[in-house]
Structures are given as structure tokens and as C-alpha cells.
Image (tube, rainbow, N blue to C red):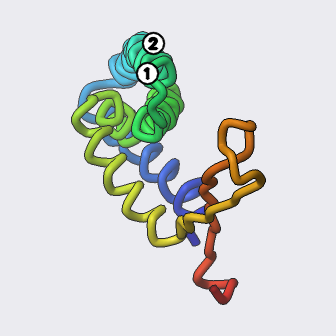
Amino acid sequence: MRLIALFIIIPLLDFMLLFKVAALIGGWQTVFIVIFTGITGASLAKHQGIMVWSALQRDLAEGKLPTDTMISGVLVLIGAVLLLTPGILTDFVGFMLMIPGNRKLIGTLTKKQLAKHVKVNNINIRTSPFPSEGGIKDAEGVRVIDEENDAP
């Protein structure tokens, strides 16, 4: 059902909205708006993408796990695709994803949704009684649980 909404209903709504706007302001003005938002969106997506890439490199250099930065990067990518798609609705959502505060909020909500499907188990593995010999002291395992199809 989600794929139907994603690939049929949303583009159809966007198409209808473009016709409404064209009826109000004119066809050429609507085409200009679509081209302008595409160019502006691509520029904004490039700028935000560079900022996210820099933050990702900084997190990795500091030895941090860049989960928030990676989620932000995926949201910038989704926003860029939406901005390059002709339409008023997709442009609005794409522009909203380019705003860092909105990405942070959406990222937090995304992590909460993912937490429902991912369970982290700490597993202690000892290959050597002496960690200085290069043995693994601790390891972390992640088990993905699909609540609809798997039994934990």
C-alpha cells in the first residue's frame, strides 16, 4: 500500500496541483517555477550534502559512530531527489528536508521507528585471556527483528 502511495498517489496529487497553479498564474509561469525550484533545489542539496559529508568525515576522524550524520545524509539525498522531481508537493517536502532542524527532528523520529525493529545484544567474546595479545575483548551484535514475519 505504501508503494502505491509513493509511486501513484503522490505524483498524481503533484500533477493535479501543477495544473491548479497553472490555471491560476499561467502555464509559462508554472514551468518557470518548476525549473527555478529544480535549479535552486540542486544547489541547496549540493551545499547541504557537502556540509553533511564534512560532518561525517569529522565524526569518523574523532572515532564517533556517525549514525545521526548518516541519517541526515540519507534525508538530504531524499530531499534532493524530491526537489529534482517536478511538482509543488514534492518540492515543498524536498525543501523541508534541506533545513537542518527539520532533518534532526525527522532523524530522531526515524531512529525511534528503527529501534522498534532492531535489538542490540552485548556479547562478550574472549579469544585470549590476555587482551594485549591481540584477542578480541568485547564485541557487539545487532539482531534485526521483523516483528511481522519473525519470532524473536
Query: Looking at the image, which is closer to me, 106 or 81?
Result: 106
Using a 10 Å C-alpha cutoff, classify the residue at mark 1 as few (fewer than 14 neighbours), some (14 to 19) or many (20 or more). few
Can residue 139 be seen from the camera position used here? yes
Q: Which mark is residue 22?
A: none
| Residue at numbered disc 1 | 62
Choose top left, top right, bottom left or bottom right for residue 39. Answer: top left
From what the image shows, is residue 138 above or below residue 99?
below
**Which residue is at a point 25% across and 39% down the rendered structure image?**
102
Q: CA distance from mark 1 to mark 2?
A: 18 Å
Compared with 139, 122 (above or below) is below
Q: Disc 2 marks which amino acid? A: Ile
Quarter placement of the C terminus = bottom right
Is 43 situated left or right of 23 in this image?
A: right
* Nearer the observer, 112 or 137: 137
Pick whichever of labels 1 and 2 is earlier in the sequence. 2
Between 122 and 30, the residue placed more toward the observer is: 122
The residue where tag 2 is placed is 50
Secondary structure at numbered mark 2: helix
Q: Tell me what residue is drawn at x 51 percent, y 23 percent.
A: 60
Q: Alpha-carbon neighbours of circle 2 within 10 Å: few (<14), some, or many (≥20)?
A: few
Q: Residue at x 53, y 62 (%)?
A: 5
Q: Residue at x 39, y 34 (%)?
A: 94
Answer whether residue 42 is visible to the viewer in this image.
Answer: no
Could you tell me residue 132's position as x and y percent?
67, 36
Element marked by disc 1: loop
Q: What is the x, y in percent for residue 59? A: 44, 24
- Inspect the image, locate mark 1, and give the three-letter code of the amino acid beneath it: Glu
Picture coordinates of residue 67, whole percent (x, y): 46, 40
